[in-house]
Image (spheres, rainbow, N blue to C red):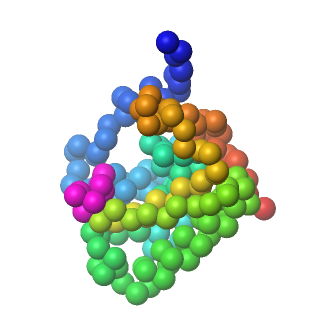
Amino acid sequence: MERLHAYWRYEYIEAPKENENSSETLFEDLPKRGDDEANYILYRTKFCYLVLNTFPYNAGHLLAIPYRAVQKLSDLTSDERLDLMNLLAFAEDLLRRALKPEGINLGINLGKAAGAGIPQHLHVHIVPRWNGDTNFMPVVGETRVLPLALKDMWKRLKSFIEL
């Protein structure tokens, strides 16, 4: 049997999954922490922010998140919806320039039954895709192989924002 070691992932196994001492969701707390690099926040707008997913489906997997916790798109104001859509277009352009994916998945899971990990705070997944990026590892081995550590991915994407 072959073994794949990803020692850098251990810090995420031990990380708290929610802010246990607060009624806030992780997505409300994250932008208040003050260190965007440590928290993988790439970009902020008036109503939303863009962050690397710390449990990615694929290398470069981003989340676009409104600052305000809402469960449904219809709970966002018109300004927040417009800002979120503009942020998605920004994220698409960023990924295309920085990683050159052959496709991009955008996804919103509304509610726990739909797969939302934090159902009380709407967020949009932006996942870069390449032909052949799905192989036996996630299907048979229940393992994802990511070619770049999150810290390095953050630096790479951030360098394309500051151009």
Rendered image quadrant of residue 31: bottom left
Q: Magenta region's main secondary structure?
A: loop
Question: Looking at this view, is 20 or 92 the one in front?
Answer: 92
State the image coordinates of residue 131 (x, y, percent, origin top left). 64, 51
Residue at (64, 37) in percent of width and height: 148
Indicate left or right for 115 with 103 as reference: left
Residue at (51, 77) in percent of width and height: 85
Question: Looking at this view, is 156 or 59 the one in front?
Answer: 59
Identify the image quadrant of the C terminus.
bottom right
Pick out the residue farthest to the top.
Answer: 1
Residue at (48, 74) in percent of width and height: 84
Indicate left or right for 87 with 130 as reference: left
Tell me the magenta residue range: 111-119
Rendered image quadrant of residue 75: bottom left
State the image coordinates of residue 134 (x, y, percent, origin top left). 54, 43
Q: Is residue 22 magenta?
A: no
Indicate left or right for 104 with 141 as reference: right
Residue at (58, 61) in percent of width and height: 104
Q: Is residue 115 magenta?
A: yes
Instruction: Report the number of discs.
Output: 0
State the image coordinates of residue 157 (x, y, percent, origin top left). 67, 52
Question: Looking at this view, is 119 or 34 the one in front?
Answer: 119
State the image coordinates of residue 146 (x, y, percent, origin top left). 58, 37
